[in-house]
Image (cartoon, rainbow, N blue to C red):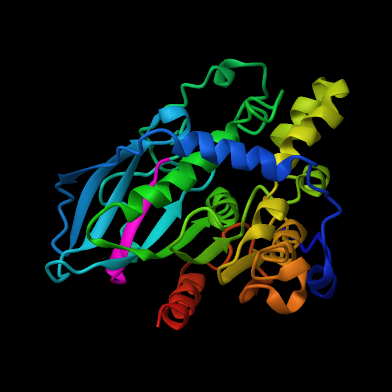
Amino acid sequence: MPLFDLSLEQLRDYTSSVVPPADFDAFWDRTITEARALPLDAVFEPVDNYLAVIDTFDVSYAGFGGDRIKGWLHLPSHRQPGQQLPVVVEYIGYSGGRGLVNQNTKWAQAGYAHFIMDTRGQGYGGVSGDTPDPHPSAGGNNYAGLMTRGADHQDNYYFRRVYVDAFRAVEAAQSHPAVDPSKVVLTGVSQGGGITVAAAGLTAGRLDGVIAALPDVPFLQDFPRAIDITPRGPYPEIAGFLGRHREKYEPTLAVLNYFDGVHLGRAATVPALFSAAQMDDICPPSTVFASYNSYGTGSSAAPGGAPEGVPVKDIEVYRFNNHEGGQEHHWIKQLQFLRKHLS
């Protein structure tokens, strides 16, 4: 894929034209308050992972609407009795789930507690999953895939449920005795990166303990531009839906606006390391930079949105990569970033 988006100089200055709905904060205040009114009921069951150096727990907890959400908690087996570890909460890419019990333990290998959230209704592509999406809107009129599921109203939209699940995943991770609840890191690639941005914004001012965010080639950012320029899925699911339902462009964009990471990340207060790939035709770099440039600018760390108050943030750009981004090279950058900010 050739370079098709803005130049790097233009990307560094690019900001989205999207404006949050007037009731954006009230919508999310109501959503999170309703979710937290339900018991979290986090359950951790030890499970054999066939690995000598990692202990694993099969996790379930109450997400949106009290629905049971699955996950894994991996811990280094050499930890000291009573020791509490910083935890990395990981969100998964589009179509993927939590995977098999020993499929992804890399953060525990690095010495952290590693909490992986299963994504409701996914796990059908790439990595398996175990969590259904029982919401009534899951069977509504939508394009194949998840991007227009429940897009008739913001209360019904699929990612409202996922973002709440992600918020409660942090609470679930914090509830385990081997986890230091004051040292939570959020991370994910693609959809997982978009959920990371959302969770960083939604936990700010509502839940203590999140200390860093690592959104890697994040999805779910700057929806209007993404729909217009992205040639490869999942954003084209939205264009496909609107190509048939021509009268629904404005109403659909109005719903998506509540879930745009450009708005959600603005409230974040914690240091962040983003990544973007300049040949990415799934999450175009301009949409990633829209999120990066907005991140933290409206937070309590930045009174009035003053630039000098924006949380520490950086972005790694991989010029000759598509959506795979930096992969193992970027993980080294993430480890270095956490070493700096956890010390």
Give the residue displayed 56% in from the left and 58% down from the top: 204
Is residue 189 within the magenta segment?
A: no
Q: Can you give x and y, in whole percent of width and height, for residue 326 in the image?
A: 55, 68
Above or below, 304 against 336 in this view is above
**Number of disc labels:** 0
Specify whether residue 235 is in view.
Answer: no
Above or below, 58 against 201 in this view is above
Q: Can you give x and y, in whole percent of width and height, for residue 203 in the image?
A: 53, 54
The quarter in which the N terminus is drawn is bottom right
Q: Can you give x and y, in whole percent of width and height, for residue 86 in the image?
A: 34, 67
Left or right? Give the position of 46 relative to 167.
left
The quarter in which the C terminus is drawn is bottom left
Above or below, 94 against 182 in this view is above
Specify whether residue 151 is in view.
Answer: yes
Q: Can you give x and y, in whole percent of width and height, for residue 35 in the image?
A: 48, 36
Which residues are drawn in magenta?
A: 108-118
Give the residue displayed 70% in from the left and 70% down from the top: 302
Left or right? Give the position of 197 relative to 59.
right
Give the residue displayed 28% in from the left and 71% down from the top: 111
Is residue 114 within the magenta segment?
A: yes
Give the residue displayed 63% in from the left and 50% down from the top: 219
Q: Nearer the viewer, residue 217 or 339?
A: 339
